[in-house]
Amino acid sequence: MVRIGSAVSTTSRRLPDPASAGSGRSPELLYPPGRLATVLLLLAAAPAAFAHAGERGFVMLLPTGLFQAGGTAAVAASFLAVAWLRAASLLRGMESAQWRCFPVPRRVRGTNAAAATLLVVLIAAGFAGSRDPLANPLPLAVWTLVWVGLAFAHAVFGYLWPHLDPWRPFASLARLAVFGSDEAPPPFSWPRMLSRWPAVALLLLLAWFELVYPAPRDPAVLAMAVAGYSVLTVTGMVLFGEGSWTRNVEVFSCFFRMVSGLAPIRIADENGARRLVLAFPGSRLPASDALPAAGVVFVVIALATVSFDGLSRTFWWLDLGGFNPLEHPGRSALVGWNTLGLAAAAACLLAAFAICTLAGARWSGTPAAPALRRFVVSIVPIAFGYHFAHYLPSFLVDAQYALKALSDPMGEGWNLLGARELHVTASFLTHHASVVAIWYAQVAAIVAAHVIAVVVLHALAGGTASGRRAQVLSQLPLTVLMIAYTLFGLWLLSTPVAA
C-alpha cells in the first residue's frame, strides 16, 4: 500500500543476499536492472518474502508473512478483547477519556483570505509557470499539500477546513456584488432528494482524475480543472449557501470533515475560553449522527479509491488485464482497464460492507437500516490508515519540492520562502534504516487503523442492538471483513508493483 515518490534515485544499486529472503533477517534493498533474466532470478530467490516495488522499481525484501499474520492476529485479538465489554460502557469510557490541557488563543483571522490569494497564485502558476510538475507549485499543492498533507492535519487536529477554505472569500464577494450584502440569504434551498450524491460523484471524478487520467499532474490541465471547480464551488455557495454546499457537494469539505472525526487533538470552548483537549483517536466517531445513504457510499468509496490506487500498480493487476508488468505500457494504455477497475473496486467494497452489515443485523435481530447508516462510521479509521500508509513515502519527498516550488511559483528566479535553492533529498528511500522505519510506520498505521475501527464498531453496536450477545452478533460479519481487509492491506504494502 505504498507509493514511493517520483523522485526516488536509481543511480545507486545494492543487491540483497538471497539467503536472507524469508529468513526474518533485516530487510535489504534492491534496484533491479531492466533485464528479464535478473528479475526472474530475484523472483525465484525470494518467493516467500516479497515486499514492494515502487514507482521507480524500488524493492524491499521482508518477512512479510510474519507481518501479515501478526497484523491480522492483532485485529482479531482486539475484537475478542472489546467483545467482553458492554458497548455502552465502552462508549462512555471513550467519551470520558479526555485530558484538558492549556488554553489556546482565538483563531487567527484572515486565513481564508490568505488561502484565496494563494489559490489565485497557484492557478496562474499552472497556466504560466514551469511545465515541470516538480517545479510548478500547483500539482504539488493540490496532490501533496492539500489532498495528503491537510488530510494528515485534519486527522490530528480536527476540522480545520472552514478556516482554510479558499472559496469562502470569493463567495462573500459574489454575494456582495449580486445581492448587495455579504449576509444575503441564498435564493435556493438544497434539494433533499439530491442529498450528498453530488459529493459522491465528485469524489469518484477526483479519484479517476488522479488515478486513471494520463496526466493529472500536468500544470496547465490541472489549472483548468482547479479553475473550473472553483467557479462551480463559488456559484454553488452563492446559490445554495455555504453550509449546504460544503455539506453535500464540495468534496474537500466532505473528505476532511470525515477524517477529522479521528482527531485526538481538538479545541473546546469552555466558559468562553478555548482549551486544547486530548482524547482517544476516533472517540468522537460513535457519537456522530447516522449518515444518509449517500454519506454511507462516500465513506466506503473513500477507502475503495485509495485501495485501488495500490492495487492498480501491482504485477497481479497488470497481468490480470493482459499487460506485461515488466514492460509497463503507460497510463494512457491503461485508461479503460483502470476505469473498470476503479468502478469494480467501489462496487465490490460497497457490496461487501452491505452484505456483512445486513448479515449482522439479521443474526442479531436488529433493524438493518440503522446499522448501515451507523456502522459505516467505523470504516473511517481504515480509510485514513490506508491514506496515510499509501501516501507517506511520496509526501516526504514531494513536500520538499512543494516548498521549493512555492518559493518561485512563476519560475522567474524569485525566492519568496527562501527555499528556491533547497536540495531535495530522497536518500531516506534508499537507506536501509530509514526505509525500514517508513515501512514499519506504514504497517503500524494499517494495523492501528483496523484496531481503532474494531473498537469504534463495538461502541456503535450499543446504539443498534440491546444485549451483549446481540451486539456481538451484529458486528461479527463486519469485523471478519475488517480482519480480511487487514490481510489485504498488508499484502498490498508488500507485493511488487510496476511503474
Image (spheres, rainbow, N blue to C red):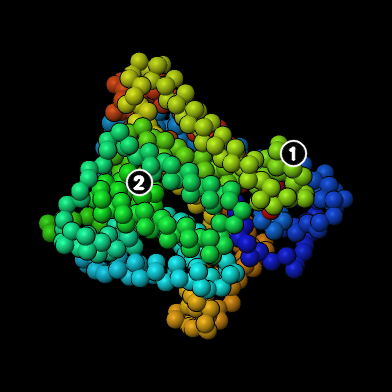
Question: Residue at the location (33% across, 70% down)?
Answer: 114
Give the residue number, with chain letter if any, for mark 2: 249
Identify which residue, 26 or 189, lies in the foreground.
189
Total number of numbered labels? 2
In the displayed structure image, the side of residue 153 where residue 275 appears, left or right: left
Q: Measuring 13% from the left and 59% from the top, which residue is drawn there? A: 272
Q: Is residue 42 left or right of residue 321?
A: right
Q: Give the vertical position of 371 relative to 116 (above or below).
A: above
Vertical comparison of 112 with 72: above or below: below
Q: Which of the 4 quarters of the picture holds residue 184?
A: bottom left
Q: Taking the image as drawn, is residue 140 in sight?
A: no
> What's the residue type where badge 1 is placed?
Gly
Please tell me how crowded label 1 is: few (under 14), some (14-19), or many (20+) other residues with Cα within 10 Å. Answer: few
Q: Where is residue 455 in the image (x, y as percent from the top left)?
A: 39, 36
| Circle 2 SS class | loop
Answer yes or no: do the residues labelled 1 and 2 have beta carbons within 8 Å? no
Q: Name the residue under label 1.
A: 322
Q: Where is residue 418 in the image (x, y as percent from the top left)?
A: 47, 82
Residue 244: image x %, image y %?
Answer: 26, 46
Mark 2 is on which residue type? Val
* N-terminal label among 1 and 2: 2
Residue 224 left/right relative to 115 = right
